[in-house]
Amino acid sequence: MKIIILSIYIVIMLLLIGCSPEVGTEAWCNDLSEKPKGEWTSNEAADYTRHCLFR
């Protein structure tokens, strides 16, 4: 039973990861600019600065 639950969890996580735009693309920049700044991680802030502000 644990194997089935773990398998379902892994499949769901892969589907969710596959739906997010690639870092640095225009869609990713737009998505992140709509997200509240307080919810950004330090990596997201650094990537946003690198890919969206200094193109």
Image: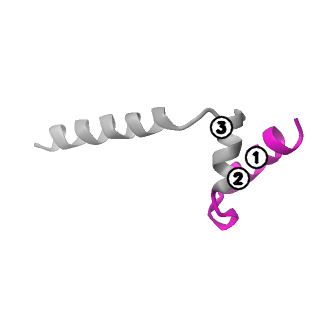
The residue where tag 1 is placed is 48
- Residue 16 has which mark? none
- Amino acid type at circle 3 is Ala
Q: Position of residue 40 (x, y in %)?
A: 65, 58
Can you tell which quarter of the image residue 55 is in? Answer: top right
Q: Quadrant of the rendered structure where residue 23 is?
A: top right
- Can you give x and y, in whole percent of width and height, for residue 31 in the image? 63, 47
Residue 22 in which image quadrant: top right
State yes or no: residue 15 in magenta. Answer: no
Q: Alpha-carbon distance for marks 1 and 2?
A: 9 Å
In the rendered image, the residue lying farthest to the left is 1
Mark 3 falls on what kind of element? Answer: helix
Asked if disc 3 and disc 2 are in contact, CB closer than 8 Å, the reply is no
Asked if the residue under mark 2 is in contact with the one under mark 1, i.e. CB atoms within 8 Å, the reply is yes
Residue sitting farthest toward the right: 54
Q: Which of marks 3 and 2 is nearer the N terminus?
A: 3
Question: Rounded to the nearest whole Å, what is the CA distance between mark 3 and mark 2?
Answer: 10 Å
Identify residue for label 3: 27
The residue segment tinted magenta is 35-55
Given residues 21 and 50, the one toward you in this image is: 21
Q: Position of residue 24 (x, y in %)?
A: 72, 35
